[in-house]
Amino acid sequence: MTASDLSDLQRRILGLKEEKGALLLAHNYQVPEIQEIADYVGDSLELCMKAMQVEDAELIVFCGVDFMAETASVLNPDKKVVIPTLSARCPMAAMLPVSVLREAKEAHPEAAVVLYVNTLAEAKAEADVVCTSANAGRIIGRLDAETVLFGPDRNLALHAARLNPGKTIIPVPADGFCYVHRSFGDGAEALELKRRHPNAELLAHPECDPEYQLKADHIFSTGQMYRHCSKSDSKAFIITTEVGMVDRLRREMSGKTFLPARGDAICEDMKRITLENTYQALEREAPVVRVPEDIAERARAPIERMLKMSR
Ligand code: 13P
Ligand code: SF4
C-alpha cells in the first residue's frame, strides 16, 4: 500500500507515531484500516514475541483486546503500553476468575497449571506456564506432569488432549468458550463451502467446536493459518475464524481465494478499536494498561517460560 492510498487519518497516525517513536502492534482480527498502518500484525504468540523484542520504542500502542495488551505490558515493565479503548475485552478471558482457578488447584494439587494466553494477568500469576493457540499441544507435551489443569478454552483443551493422548487434561472452568468460534457450530456452512469448492483447504482455529475441528484439513492459530496459506500450493482456502483474518489474507495474498466460513464471525471486542480511538490513544498516551507490579512479576515467569519452551 502506498502513502497515497491511505486515508487522511491513517497518515496522521503514521506521522504522530513517527514523531513519538511509538510502535503500533495489531492482532489479525483488527479492522483492515488498522492492520494497514501497524508496524506488526500477528497472532497472540507473535505479538508476545514482538513485545518482548521492543528496544527502541518507549510507547507501545496495542490494537487488540485486554489480555494481549496486558501481556505486552507485563513483558515490558519499563515501557508505556496504551490500548485505544479499555472496552476491548475478551469475554473468554473473563471466564476464569482467580477464585475458580484456586479451587481447581486445591482439588488437583498434583496437576500442572497451563493457561491460555487469553486470561487476565491475575490468573496468569497462578500458572506454571502460559500457552497460545499456536503451541498449546507442544507446551503440554514438554511438561513432566501427567495431569494438567487447562483454562479457560475447553475446545483448545480438547485439541491439546488429542495431541497428548497419555495426559489427563482438565478444563477449568468446565465450559469456557469463545462466542465467535462457537458460532461455527458443527461447521455446516464451512462444509457446504467445501462441497462447492472441493479443492479449497479447510482451516479451523482450535477454539472451534471439536466435532468440527475433526473435519477440518488443518487446525491452526491465526499466525499459522497465514504462514500455511502463503506456502501452500492450493489456490483456495476456507477460513474458520474471525473475519479480520480473511481481510489480511485477501490483502496480502491477492493471487489466492479466501472464503470466510461465516461472514458474520465478528469479534465485537476487537472491532471496538478504530482509527479514531487509536489516534487519540497515541496523542494522549492513554489509556495506559496497568498491571499491579506484584501481579506482573508473578505473571511474567509463566509467559517467559512459554517463550523459552516454544523456541
Ligand atoms: P490467535 O493467537 O490464534 O490469533 O488467537 C487469538 C484469539 O483471540 C482467537 O480468538
Ligand atoms: Fe476473545 Fe473470541 Fe474475541 Fe478471540 S475472538 S478475542 S477469544 S472473544
Image (spheres, helix red, strand yellow):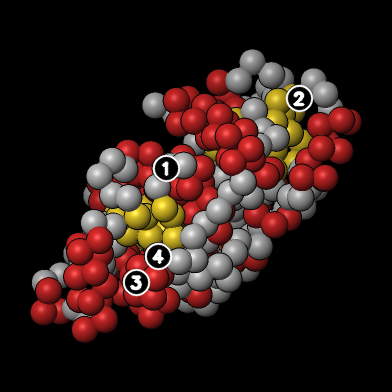
Question: Residues at badges 4 and 2 in contact (C-beta under 8 Å)?
Answer: no
Give x and y (percent) for residue 168. Answer: 74, 28
Question: Residues at badges 3 and 4 in contact (C-beta under 8 Å)?
Answer: yes
- Please give the label number shown on residue 111: 2
Quote the CA–CA distance across marks 3 and 4. Answer: 6 Å
Q: Is residue 252 above or below residue 123?
A: below
Q: Earlier in the sequence, mark 2 or mark 1?
A: 1
Quote the CA–CA distance across marks 4 and 2. Answer: 41 Å
Quote the CA–CA distance across marks 1 and 3. Answer: 20 Å
Residue extending farthest top: 144
The type of residue carrying mark 3 is: Glu
- Please give the label number shown on residue 271: none
Q: Quadrant of the C terminus?
A: top left
Give x and y (percent) for residue 93. Answer: 65, 54
Give x and y (percent) for residue 264. Answer: 52, 77
Mark 1 highlights which residue? 78
Residue extending farthest bottom: 8
Mark 3 highlights which residue? 283
Which residue is painted at 32% across and 59% down in the image?
Answer: 24
Q: What SS does tag 2 mark?
A: loop
